[in-house]
Amino acid sequence: MPSTNWEDIDHYLNDHGVDEDASLASAVQRSKAAGLPEIQVAPNQGKLLSLLVQGLGAKRVLEVGTLGGYSTLWLARGLGRDGRIVTLELDPKHAAVASDNLTRAGVRERVDLRVGPALDSLAKLAEERPAPFDFVFIDADKANIPHYFDWALRLARVGTWIVVDNVVRKGAILDPASSDPNVQGVRRFFERLKGERRVTATAVQTVGSKGHDGLAFAVVTAEA
Ligand code: SAH
Ligand code: DHB
Ligand code: MG
């Protein structure tokens, strides 16, 4: 019996091998209790981030858009003890909840959580001339995705993975005349991707407990 009940199917998948642990589940609960929007990645998507980080042997991760730290925690799970994450969040309230969640999960000291507009934080970060990031997850305001992608490229090395969340928006990205700045941001990002010779990329639609959206994946093939 085929089913289009994405929610039930996600439940089933999350129950078979995803292994969301108690501190991850509690991060979702505490974020919700604090009134944060429930827009964190789904457990199976978080696990995908974790597996990629683990599989690549990434040591340095950059995340744009922390919310309550749920995706941050999944990234940290894939990193291991000597890995570090820089995560950028605009909203001090979100950052406070994230800090608490990361502390409870025992990974707070491995995460450099910076509060403020990510474009400012990225400019500051670049001035510090950090070692290149191995993995970048872009998941903040969608209007700025093209700018975050530019910064990711500048802070990357050949071989760095750049993953971008929410690149389908229930299919709204197909409307070139959309008045939604988020949609326009995603469209400009894809236009960039099409002409960008320094990366090789793909994007896939996602459907599940978080509705219909998509993830883009780019691997850096040449220095910025
Ligand atoms: N990555 C998180 C979800 C992030 S939701 C997870 O999956 O668990 C998007 C977050 O981006 C929100 O917390 C929002 O406050 C933040 N945000 C929005 N605009 C931003 C900006 N200009 N700079 C930094 N963060 C921003
Ligand atoms: C929104 C943001 C996200 O990062 C997400 O995963 C889903 C929705 C939003 O701003 O609507
Ligand atoms: Mg997202």
Image: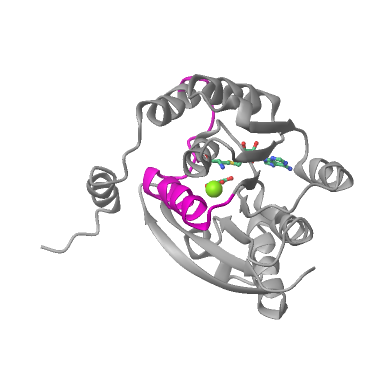
Residue 58 place in picture, x, y as percent: 57, 51
Q: Quadrant of residue 85?
A: top right
Q: Indicate whether residue 48 is drawn in magenta.
A: yes
Instruction: Answer with left or right where residue 1 lies relative to residue 215.
Output: left
Camera-nearest residue between 168 and 118: 118
- Kindly identify the residue that appears in the image at 51 percent across and 69 percent down: 203
Does residue 169 sit above or below 190 in this rendering?
Answer: above
Does residue 219 sit above or below 105 in this rendering?
Answer: below
Give ligand 1's quarter of the image: top right
Q: How many marks?
A: 0
Q: Indicate whether residue 148 is drawn in magenta.
A: no
Span shown in magenta: 33-58
Residue furthest to the left: 1
- Kindly identify the residue that appears in the image at 32 percent across and 45 percent down: 18
Residue 89 makes an appearance in the image:
yes
- Kindly identify the residue that appears in the image at 49 percent across and 65 percent down: 171
Q: Quadrant of the N terminus?
A: bottom left
Instruction: Answer with left or right where residue 210 lies relative to residue 80.
Output: left
Residue 50 place in picture, x, y as percent: 46, 47
Instruction: Answer with left or right where residue 123 lies relative to residue 109.
Output: right
Q: Quadrant of the C terminus?
A: bottom right
Residue 16 place in picture, x, y as percent: 23, 46
Does residue 102 sit above or below 151 in this rendering?
Answer: above
Residue 35 makes an appearance in the image:
no
Camera-nearest residue between 2 and 128: 128
Camera-nearest residue between 188 and 84: 84
Instruction: Answer with left or right where residue 131 lies relative to residue 137.
Output: right
Residue furthest to the front: 82
